[in-house]
Amino acid sequence: MSSVTYTIPNINCNHCVHTITSELSELPGVQSVKADAQSKQATVVYDAPADEAKIEALLKEINYPAVKG
């Protein structure tokens, strides 16, 4: 199992948190997602077939581009 934390500047409210959490949770291999509007960060715990490239691509697709770290 792997974990990655992203800074997502567009997280502004609980709706953003819900959208990010629900969308990433649907990605095969994602075990958990914790997003926070106050810190503007999301931590994703995942296994294969999910990987950082797929996670980042999905975040970009739903208009929440992310920066690792």
Image (spheres, rainbow, N blue to C red):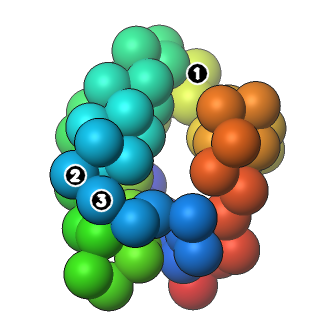
Which residue corresponds to mark 3? 13
Q: Classify residue 57 as left or right of residue 27.
A: right
Residue 8 percent across, percent down from the top left? 56, 69
Quarter location, residue 15: top left
Give whichever of 54, 9 is nearer the camera.
Answer: 9
Give the position of the C terminus as an image quadrant. Answer: bottom right
Q: Is residue 19 above or below residue 3?
A: above
Give whichever of 47, 9 is nearer the camera.
Answer: 9
Kindly identify the amino acid type of the residue bearing the numbered disc 3: Cys
Which residue corresponds to mark 1? 49
Distance Cα–Cα, label 1 vs label 3: 30 Å
Dots 2, 3 in contact, CB < 8 A: yes
Q: Earlier in the sequence, mark 1 or mark 2?
A: 2
Give whichever of 5, 62 is nearer the camera.
Answer: 62
Counting other residues with Cα less than 10 Å from the Cα at mark 2, is it few (<14), some (14-19), or many (20 or more)? few
Q: Residue at the location (70% across, 42% down)?
A: 63
Instruction: Judge depth for marks 1 and 3 and give the one in front.
Output: 3
Q: Earlier in the sequence, mark 1 or mark 3?
A: 3
Please tell me the numbered disc located at residue 14.
2
**Count of labels in the image:** 3
Please tell me the numbered disc located at residue 19.
none
Residue 11 percent across, percent down from the top left? 45, 63
Q: Classify residue 35 as left or right of residue 64.
A: left
Residue 32 percent across, percent down from the top left? 23, 40
* Residue 61 appears in the rendering: yes
Quarter location, residue 50: top right
Q: Residue at the location (63% across, 51% down)?
A: 64
Q: Is residue 10 above or below residue 58?
A: below
Instruction: Judge depth for marks 1 and 2 and give the one in front.
Output: 2
Kindly identify the amino acid type of the residue bearing the numbered disc 1: Pro
Kindly identify the amino acid type of the residue bearing the numbered disc 2: Asn
